[in-house]
Amino acid sequence: MRSRCMIIRNAISLVSLGLGAVVAAWMPNLTAHAAEVDVPPFYEAVAKLAPAGKLGQVIAKEPVATSVPGAVAWRIAYVSSDVGDRPTIATGLVIAPQGAPPQGGRPIVAWAHGTTGTAQNCGPSQVLNPVQELNEYFLVGGTSWTDFGVPSIAELVKEGYVVVATDYQGLGGGGRHQYAVAVTQGRDVIDSIRAAGSLGLGGDGRKAIVYGWSVGGGATLAAAGMPDYIGRKDTAYDGIAVIGFAALAPYDVAVTAPKGPQDDAAATAMLEGLSKTFSDNAMNFAHYAMSLWAMPAAFPALKLTDVFTEDGARAIDTIFSKKCMHAGADTIAYTFGSTYKQLLRDRPANAAAWSRALIEGSVAPVAPVAPVIIYWGTKDVVVPPVMGQLYREQMCGLGADVTRVQLAGEQTHFSTPVAAKPLYLQWIKDRFAGKAMPNGCAMP
């Protein structure tokens, strides 16, 4: 990967200094906590609003130009809530076919995006032309410093669907982003459906499908296991019926955790196992560090210094309150070279609380409200495919309908959305059409 060459290059120049000297040389830049970043005027205004109103209530919107044939689009800000049931503001996009909805209304398709970062300027709806096909940083055709866009947007609009793409909370609407807290992101997705419905673009349509990739795949699985949240009353758009969930390379921490009560030793082993799994290179470490950075916002009893050294906590807080994914990973690689693991404590403190929080914020062991389909590639080294396998086994044991599809060829984490596109498009179409399909848990 791009960052690996940078790690090797910087390791040569930095290894003789040691981490202490590197941090000491870099310390003058550590002058601000959670520094503000520049965002477009729409988001600057939204961040000053209170998260007051019903779940899914749109509290701000502005038109967005798009070249997608037959489409109209808006940026929106809407009310949601997090894992602690605290009200939040999430931003995002709504895209709809032009013209009045047909009799019976239009279905709604909700997109849950992958990792973009944790700073306020990392919401994908903020880029100059956000309503386009998924545009990936790592792929040859990528044109940006970040991943953005909505997969299959032209095809979905052509089918007559209203499409909503949340940024999640904390990526433009104020507040600290709860990255990889699947419950929070799952709620943001569900409330995005309510937001889209409340705008009247789908008429009286109540049927919806969620599709998501990577951390958004985790949000998709989390949303699938939230029957009570989906069924809440007195929202901005009651009665939504989510009839399917398509997860591309989904992330699920809880399913890999040891079962039953955990003592401090077991909790420590869990955290150390996660650190080992997600610290093999600077980019994966950046993902892991961002998830640790985000946890105290969701679970206030946690502290960054439980898992990072004092200098490490200051570095990670400064980096990920200011920078998005790839810039943050480059900063870690450039500044710390091969010594980035030393930003972590040798042994985590408060391990039991961290372990409980990681599980509580992850996908709940609840049978999904509708069929789930998972797409995965054999060369995914970012999110271990075993997470999807274990999720399917767990949910099939609860009587669910979960299908798992291995993509043809040797697909990586980043080629998964492209390879899965024709498969999930047909699956979505068949679900909305009410086509009978075999139960995925009855398949090999």
Image: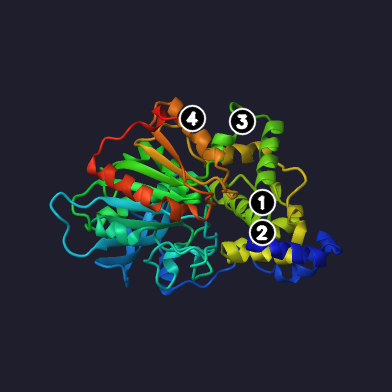
Find out whether the residues at labels 2 and 4 contact each other: C-beta distance under 8 Å.
Answer: no
Q: Nearer the viewer, mark 1 or mark 4?
A: 4
In what element is the residue under mark 1?
Answer: helix
**Between discs 1 and 3, the one toward the N terminus:** 3
Rendering coords of residue 239 (x, y %):
25, 42
**Mark 2 → mark 3, Cα distance in angstroms:** 28 Å
- Residue behind mark 2: 316
* SS at circle 2: helix
Element at label 3: loop
Hey, which residue is sitting farthest left in the picture?
Answer: 103
The kind of residue tagged 1 is Leu
Q: Is residue 176 above or below residue 263?
A: below
Q: Are marks 3 and 4 in contact (CB under 8 Å)?
A: no
Residue with the mark numbered 3: 258
- Do the CB atoms of the residues marked 2 and 1 lie less than 8 Å apart? yes
Q: Where does the image place residue 131, in percent across and percent down from the top left? A: 36, 66
Relative placement, left or right, of 380 versus 346 is left
The amino acid type, in three-letter code, at marker 3 is Pro
Mark 2 surroundings within 10 Å by alpha-carbon count, few (fewer than 14), some (14 through 19), many (20 or more): many
- Mark 2: amino acid: Ile
Task: Looking at the image, tell me whether mark 2 or mark 4 is earlier in sequence order.
Answer: 2
- Disc 1 versus disc 3: distance between alpha carbons? 23 Å
Q: Earlier in the sequence, mark 2 or mark 1?
A: 1
Circle 1 residue: 304
Mark 3 packing: few (<14 Cα in 10 Å), some, or many (20+)?
few
Check disc 4 and report the residue beneath it: 394
**Rendered residue at 27%/59% (across/down):** 157
Cα–Cα gap, marks 2 and 1: 9 Å
